[in-house]
Image (cartoon, rainbow, N blue to C red):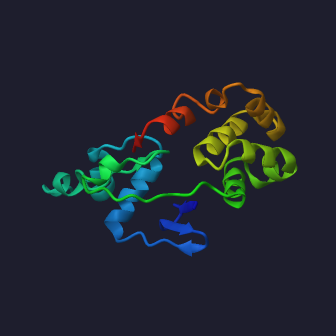
Amino acid sequence: MLIEFRMLGPLEAEAGGTAVPLGGPRPRLVLAALLLELGRAVGTDRLIEAVWDTDIPASARTLISGCCVVVTARRRLEGLLTDGAVAVPLEMMDDDEATALLHGVIGPERAASEPDGAAALIGLCGGLPLALRIAAARLVSRPGWTLGEIAQRLSADDDRLDELGNAERQVRAASSSPTVT
């Protein structure tokens, strides 16, 4: 299931057309700070600054430290569950969710201009949000490329995982080892 976050105005989350409760002001600030640093480790100091800005209480580090860690992995990490972690399994994106993600990154006009290329790209990314986001980011940074061209690159590439990587994010790394953010 795809969860959509909106940060312009009040922070909101929606999954499948239903609002997702986000808690009070401080959890919302922590979530917003994490969303702004998506895909990167966020230190305690950054979270403290996001929640309290300049009026930081002495207990801030104790309140923030260890309170929230998000681990994503393609395989089950049972060892974390013994330490009190909560597993939240997510399904692969369906075609509608993948289409919405693609439209959100490259724009609906560009995606609609090549429906066959969009469908091929979505199929080649196999329901993986990270794979589709990286491919879409390539399209944004290379406006001369068509959706069909990147789909062809992915289908012709002997190692699609190498094609779906950049300096900051790699599908290969995400599929073989856990990422802590």
In percent of width and height, residue 52 lies at: 27, 58
Give the quarter of the figure containing the N terminus: bottom right
- Name the foreground residue: 67 vs 42: 67
Whether 173 is drawn above or below 32: the answer is above
Q: Residue at x 19, y 51 (%)?
A: 61
24 lies left or right of 126: left
Whether 118 is drawn above or below 9: the answer is above
Outermost residue to the left: 58
Whether 55 is drawn above or below 174: the answer is below
Quadrant of residue 56 within the rendered picture: bottom left
In percent of width and height, residue 62 lies at: 16, 54
In percent of width and height, residue 123 lies at: 74, 46
Q: Residue at x 68, y 54 (%)?
A: 98
115 lies left or right of 104: right
Question: Tag count in the figure?
Answer: 0
110 lies left or right of 35: right
- Name the foreground residue: 51 vs 130: 130
Outermost residue to the top: 158
In percent of width and height, residue 140 lies at: 70, 39
180 lies left or right of 44: right
Give the quarter of the figure containing the C terminus: top left
